[in-house]
Image (cartoon, helix red, strand yellow):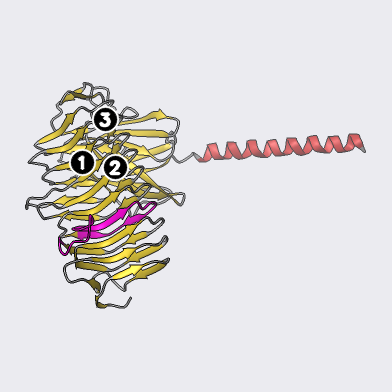
Amino acid sequence: MRSGIYLEYLTIEKPVFIYGESRENTIIVGNGSRILLRIYSDNVNISSLWLRNASTALYLKRVNNCTIFQNKITDIKIGVYTGKSSGTAIYLDKSDNTIIKENFVTDIYYTHVFLEGANHNKISDNTFIANTRWSQALLLRNSHNNIIEWNKVYGTSRINEGGIGAMYSSGNTIQFNDIKQNDWCGISLRASNGTIIKGNNITGHHILFGLYLKRTENTTIYCNNFEDNLKDVAVDEAKNTTWAFNGLGNYWDKYEGFDKDQDGVGDSIYSFSGQHDTSPLMGKFYPFKLSLDSVAKSLEVISNSTIWLNSSQTSEQKIVLKSKGQLGEYAFCLIKVPKRGENLRVTVSGREPFVFKNIVKNYNSTFLYILYVHEKLEETIVIMPEAKSFTLQIIVLILIIISILAALTFMYKKVRENA
């Protein structure tokens, strides 16, 4: 669709790809009520549009394999009755295998994304800003095995519902999201089982809780940052909740333990709300996206400094991180590398760290622990394969040549014997 303002409502009943020239200038606008786009077909792609001023932006009914990509959705309110989707930006009604990615959603009366009876969907890299009283970023009801990752889930100074909620839903993964300043809860699970909550920032919840668990079972919660919350966690009849995985718990800004054995994990248990984190982290968890060997992977860092990835210098051969801290301050990084790291070398602004350890957690994961002092406000951490000495390379080459000559000699003798 070319740039312009389109005053219309669409019903889509066959596979189609609808994309605009840009989401700022290709605008489908309603009259404040009804559903802008009704989707009743599999394999529909909606991209680069601004959908606004309706009671529902997108309604997907019993469809599969659709994509909602890089759209802007605003001004969704309760208008003329549109059924249970009223006030919702994106409503998945018994729709599976949908990708909702890189959208910007705000000024929504009720829910930004509502999954009802919707399974195996992926919601990633979106920005949700809840700035009205009942506005909530994500709500799952009777929806299973969905992935919610890398989203920004922000409340504002105005009263809002906010956060991510799940009811009667199982097997969902909530990971690597930045969740902050939501008035109700950062994450709320009710009667939902088998949820994995990993690597989220859960910060700035000043009215109720960072995380709320009610009648849940078998929830695994690890590598999350709980910081600046009135109360980090509230638990009501939760069973079999695990607060650590593979030797890593969560970061709690209220934890005051020590790490004498220098592995990035506190030496004592952190107890709260009748729960126990057996492996509390001594620094915040930082996840990064990167591609190694042409495969998308995540790099995970735990540190008491502020860490970010220098993506312009990171390549197949090396990973470059930046570390910001106070001058003269001791800092550590526990770095999970995407492949085994026995032959990796780490330098800090060209220096060898004071402490360097390989900590093997299991067959597929190796952690590199380094301890260093901030000689500058910003240090550069480089991870790369350890260079092999020239002499060792020559020896290896000679051994290979000897093996080849021996094999050729053996084959020659056999030929002579059979001649």
Q: Nearer the viewer, mark 3 or mark 1?
A: 1
Q: CA distance from mark 3 to mark 1?
A: 17 Å
The reply to whether callout 3 and callout 2 are in contact (CB within 8 Å) is no
- The spot of residue 81 in percent (x, y) is 18, 61
Label 2: how many Cα within 10 Å (few below 14, some 14–19, many 20+): many
Secondary structure type for disc 2: strand
Residue 153 visible in image:
yes
Name which quarter of the figure residue 69 lies in.
bottom left
In the rendered image, which residue does mark 2 sit on? 174
Which residue type does callout 3 highlight? Gly
Q: Residue at x 34, y 53 (%)?
A: 313
Q: Earlier in the sequence, mark 3 or mark 1?
A: 1
Secondary structure type for disc 1: strand
Q: Earlier in the sequence, mark 3 or mark 2?
A: 2
The reply to whether callout 3 and callout 1 are in contact (CB within 8 Å) is no
Label 3: how many Cα within 10 Å (few below 14, some 14–19, many 20+): many
- Magenta stretch bounds: 77-105
In which quadrant will I find the N terminus?
A: bottom left
In the rendered image, which residue does mark 3 sit on? 249
Q: Earlier in the sequence, mark 2 or mark 1?
A: 2
Name which quarter of the figure residue 205 lies in.
top left
Q: Nearer the viewer, mark 3 or mark 2?
A: 2
The reply to whether callout 2 and callout 1 are in contact (CB within 8 Å) is yes
249 relative to 346, above or below: above
Which residue type does callout 2 highlight? Ile
Label 1: how many Cα within 10 Å (few below 14, some 14–19, many 20+): many
Give the number of the disc on residue 187: 1
Q: Is residue 73 left or right of residue 320?
A: left
- The spot of residue 93 in percent (x, y) is 31, 53
* Residue 49 lies within the magenta run: no
In which quadrant will I find the C terminus?
A: top right
Q: Is residue 77 left or right of residue 396?
A: left
